[in-house]
Image: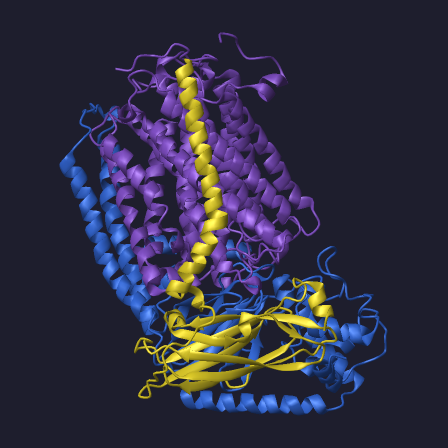
Chain colours: A blue, B yellow, C purple
Amino acid sequence: MLSRVGRLSACLLGLATMVGVNSTALAEEVERWGVNMPVGVTQVSRETYGLHMDIFWWCVGIGVVVFGVMFYTMIVHRKSNGAKASNFHESTTLEIIWTVVPFLILIIMAIPATKTLLKIYDFSETDMDIVVTGYQWKWKYEYLGEEVSFFSSLSTPREQIDNLAPKGPNYLLEVDEPLIIPTGKKVRFLITANDVIHAWWVPDLAVKRDAIPGYVNESWTIVDEPGVFRGQCAELCGKDHGFMPIVVKALPQDEFDQWLQTKKAEAATLRALTEKEFTFDELYSQGEAVYNRVCAACHQVNGAGVAGVFPAIKGSAIATGQMAAHLDIIVNGSKKNPAMAAFGPQLSEVDIASVITFQRNAFGNNMGDSVQPIDVLKFKQGGQ
Amino acid sequence: MTDSVQKSILATALRLSGVVVAMFVFAVYIMPPMYDLFCEITGLNGKTGGQYQATDAKVDESRWVTVQFLATNNENMPWSFKPALTSIKVHPGEEVEVRYLAVNPTSANMVGQAVPSVVPFKAADYFHKTECFCFNQQILPAGQQAELPLRFIVDLDLPQQITTITLSYTLFDVTERTTTNLVSSL
Amino acid sequence: MAHGPAKGISRWLFTTNHKDIGTMYLWFSFAMFLMGGVFALVIRAELFEPGLQIVQPEFFNQMTTMHGLVMVFGAVMPAFVGLANWMVPMMIGAPDMALPRMNNWSFWILPFAFAMLASTLLMEGGAPNFGWTFYAPLSTTYAPPSVTFFIFAVHIMGASSIMGSINIIATILNMRAPGMTFMKMPLFVWTWLITAYLLIAVMPVLAGVVTMMLMDIHFGTSFFDAAGGGDPVLFQHVFWFFGHPEVYIMILPAFGVVSQIIPTFARKPLFGYASMVYATSSIAFLSFIVWAHHMFTVGMPVAGELFFMYATMLIAVPTGVKVFNWVTTMFKGSMTFETPMLFSLAFVVLFTIGGFSGLMLAIAPADFQYHDTYFVVAHFHYVLVPGAIFSITAAVYYWLPKWCGRMYDETMGKTHFWLAFLGLNLTFFPMHFVGLAGMPRRIPDYALQFADFNMIASVGAFLFGAAQILFLYNVIATIKKGKPATDEVWENPEGLEWTVASPAPYHTFTTPPQVK
């Protein structure tokens, strides 16, 4: 922390001496400090940035004039300078001028803004569609017509958030599985939500749309160059609103196609895995990873939960009771407490089997039993 | 204070109280239906109208429109719910039937309600459903599955620049809000 | 009517005197200001560094929610009602408010409302955690059980505001001294009259929206629940139909205050009195047709986006007129810079900066980038803190000598000003930067590139908080042992309030003055 304060004052000093001396250095400094909207990587984001800067300079200009007159007055027309007050208090001409001139400036601003808005609203001729669904507190991406879909959640380790480990460069802006899109293609996002309202926002793409349960919103982007772009949920959606980032990775078309093929193959493998018989240890260790990724945010790493809010897994009636009830709450969620979501559609059968096995045997819950992915699948299909 | 001032104060206060009551009534009883009406006219939120009666059998065979189907489960809805086809090409004016598949994997009888939404919003006005499972709540006994039919017509007047219509259904679990005998009668 | 105040606690419990009630409103709002301030400092302390240090996300969300609710409904609005209670009758030459008993009720239900709201912090599941805008379904299906208490608290606050507004309108319309025509009324009275009409129009809408929430939560309706045929977006429309006029409710009386103070210390009449009145009215009118600019990213037909964008941009015109009028009032005056004037000048500059960022936010395509980021937080704090809070502070310094007959300590006042000014800018200016660079609002932890500016903002916030303690001390010291003030207090100030003795007698203008 001390080092940051030191760096801060050094930067301020440096910034102060650089102003008016070296404009490129200043520009670099502005860049490094992140004081402005990113220009972004799409046509729309560049236009938005242009609009932002135009209106900003208009405001600066008006500010210079108005505050200039005001400060001139404050310096010259002060009583201590012997200024005598005049008595004028009306001037129709002046008042007409300062009603009309701002109005004209507004019209000048409104024209490019309207053009950009109409461009953003042109949803025609899209090349591919991705359904983006907001969950408390992760995103699901579904490639429409491709049978590929996956969840994308925060991958920053809990220790970094709790200040037990040094923070990585992409702290809170990293996910386990980014959204992959091809470059140069018009990608349409169909945005909706599963529970509360979220908002999908990637600054570099200049895309921000609310994800509303029950309704679909649309937006689109064309990314010209490959790259990784990071964003966050922009609508308060509950406890972990600050912990559901978005990472978009743009790949050239051929690499994208390759990725999509791999993804499809993975899905097939997963289906095969579901049939496989796992050992207790395999399930337990896989389950621990799933638990820390999915469950620990609420039920805590030590399984103790948060009193009055999130029940403990340690010694819980479900984790030490009937297997069917345990399967039910994981797959179908809790009827009583909406905070316990249905994980059936979100996790693979393998993940569910292993996390249940882990929960029943960790934190001193020595049930000694385990469940196989195939049983989870049967439960999902047959309701038993 | 004179009596006449007192009187006019009272009159002002009464008038203003009237405004207060009127604004409350406006917010609770007028704004929601007004909003629904507004949504239906402008397609705001992609809301579609109710059941449509086909009047004209004309079909524009020169034009193709792609209709995409999405399915989302809200929250803890455990049903498996998906469209039989993810997209279909239709001519404006032609009546088409598609199906959604729903499975209730739980051991309880459940009731679901599908909520439709259309993008682009502009298209919502031109997407007519002659029959839809979303008009009613869907009852599905434990472990059962069902094919849910949807019949629609894309309006002949659909603006030329719209080539794709996306129809999304979000399925809500409404078992608890439905009267109990409806479920137990299964 | 010539008797003085009753003795002891019953003076305050049963008083119908506008000055007593005004005083209670002001002290109450200051207490709420400190409470909301403590919530803000919890937020800033957690955001001092990246990582979770002091509070967990659940509690952080409760803090942002309670901070907003307490500041809007507990600090700013009651403070303006308090000023109106004290000053409106004295400015129009009336003996008291039109409905003195209702005046007593409208104050005394407030402490109950806020006690109920604050008690939610101790409830199981915690206080409301869905933001002061309480969007459904986060505030309905997913809300903590305390939401019911929140709803009743909002109902009571609304009732209080409505009664207060009815009283103010009835007073202004019926009790002006002979000769006090509408176009002779001081601007503070004018702006409050318009504000009161806004309150009457939109507080019932707020009551309506929380009532619908209550019915959704407890009585099985589905106004905001898509599953039952409702729509969560409807909530936002109804809320902002209240919410946008609400924003002006918090700023129009501030315009009035500043329009009283600047002429006094420029020793020159207010420039463009009539245009000030018209500008205020047009701002009030426009406030009803711009609400959806809070919802540009919700998804509207493009025609809707354009309409709300244009209408919002239009607000810049009357607001600009006001700023130009204030600057021209100073021009060729004979200016001095006592504490109320310093706060008012800072108001003009900083409110204008907030207006500029408001104009930027009005540009819908750019708003897609700004929306729900710290840029928005910076924007509305620039209009509310130097806007509402600074104008209230200026008003207290300006009229305090009239209220208690004693002069405040000018050096301490100026120190308060400079500390607050510095603290405010340190806190809120960097928020523009982090917002533009991509930091969403209402997050308890943030990515590393936002760290430096957040640290500056947190330091500034504690400085600003400390400055308010100095304010409290200065006010108490003035009341207890300030030097006696003259009846005029300032040099030839305009207005009936300066024609009565300092401190203002318990009953003023029992015989109406004649206004020329």
Question: At x 50% / y 52%, what residue is drawn?
Answer: C455
Q: Quadrant of the C terminus of chain C?
A: top left
Q: Position of residue C151 (x, y in %)?
A: 59, 45
* Nearer to the camera, C219 or C444: C219
Question: At x 62% / y 15%, what residue is drawn?
Answer: C8
Q: Position of residue C398 (x, y in %)?
A: 39, 24
Up/down of C331 relative to C153, above or below: above
Q: Position of residue B12 (x, y in %)?
A: 41, 27
Up/down of A10 relative to A159, above or below: above
Question: At x 47% / y 54%, what residue is drawn?
Answer: B32
Q: Report whether residue A33 is seen.
A: no
List the single residue furthest toward the top.
Answer: C2
* Nearer to the camera, A15 or C274: C274
Up/down of A314 relative to C501, above or below: below
Q: Residue A379: which quarter of the image?
A: bottom right
Q: Position of residue A297 (x, y in %)?
A: 66, 65
* Nearer to the camera, A250 or A197: A197
* Nearer to the camera, C102 or A72: C102
Q: Along the horizontal axis of the image, is C166 left or right of A278? A: left
List the single residue furthest toward the front.
Answer: B55
Q: Along the horizontal axis of the image, is C102 left or right of A93? A: right
Q: Report whether residue A48 is seen.
A: yes
Q: Residue C57: which quarter of the image?
A: bottom right
